[in-house]
Amino acid sequence: MRATQPRIAVTTSARSGWRIFPLVALNLWVAGARGVRWGTGRPADLDDVDGLIIGGGDDISPMLYGGELWADARLDPERDALEQRLAEEALGHGIPVLGICRGAQMLNVALGGTLHADAYAAFPGSRRTRTILPRKRVRAVRGSWLATFSGRDEMKVNALHSQAVDRLGTGLRVAAHDEGGMVQAIERPEPPFALGVQWHPEHLLYQRAQRRIFAALVTAARARAEGRAARPSLEAAI
């Protein structure tokens, strides 16, 4: 029997989505799913999809988590409202979620967590590296789902973010740190699948560990589409 091809919604910014969405869609296609672009002004009905990716982009407004406004922050309130709603509804209805960079932060905020508005001021020991190339070293927490399905305790990733997770949202745990102690990934230990990574795995298709991130999401989305429950595992690896 042919495996179900899940439909995965991908939220993007109006400014950069035209170049980011094709990369994410390619990663999803390799993993066996179809990506559908969402954003402000576009249809966004969770009944039409099996999974959700909250993509990268502008900073999240501190109004959402009681933080202080950082002078250099670039905000998108309409996108904030859309993605917060989608994250809350997706998790409430058992829809698997992957957060990428800003999306990881939104996943945390949607579950009641807070952020460091200026991450590198809060973690001076973390090396600031703004590049899509894998120049940042992160370590997955032993026993985390991220470590399990990626098959790696340590990874070299890229970094473009200025914000980072502070207080964890309800039901989340830390899945990876960088060398300075900054949180680099968060996850839900229980279903539905929810993972947030501070880096951009869509730019790292050539790394097996990064392909496995998308494969784990697709495995969970396919299981939901077929009415089954799934946990991340190396069986999702590609």
Image: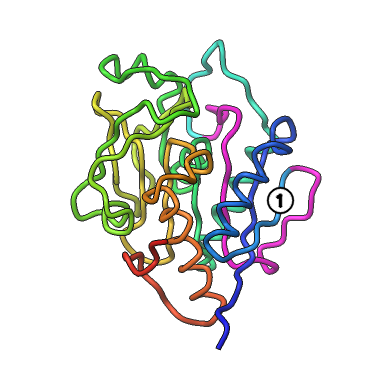
Which is more toward the observer, 171 or 201? 201
Which is more toward the observer, 152 or 199? 152
Which is more toward the observer, 74 or 135? 135
Q: From the top left corner, tell me how far across and down residue 195 is, in percent.
A: 42, 51
Give the answer, above or below, for where 194 lies relative to 163. below
Q: From the top left corner, tell me how far across and down residue 54 is, in percent.
A: 57, 46
Residue at image coords 78%, 55%? 43
Q: From the top left corner, tell me how far across and down residue 216 is, in percent.
A: 43, 61
In the image, 180: left or right of 226? Answer: left
Residue ranking furthest to the right: 41
Give the answer, above or below, for where 29 lies relative to 94. above
Q: From the top left corner, tell me how far across and down residue 32 is, in percent.
A: 56, 66
Q: Quadrant of the C terminus?
A: bottom left
Residue ranking furthest to the top: 71
Residue at image coords 62%, 20%? 74
Instruction: Tell me where residue 199 sits by quadrant.
Output: top left
Residue at image coords 65%, 62%? 34
* First to last magenta residue range: 40-64
Give the answer, above or below, for where 235 lies relative to 195. below
Which is more toward the observer, 45 or 222? 222
The residue indicated by pointer 1 is 37
Q: What type of secondary structure mainly makes up the magenta span?
A: loop
Residue ranking furthest to the bottom: 1
Mark 1 lies on a secondary structure that is: strand
Q: Quadrant of the N terminus?
A: bottom right
**Magenta stretch: residue 133 in it?**
no
Q: The disc labelled 1 sits on which kind of residue? A: Arg
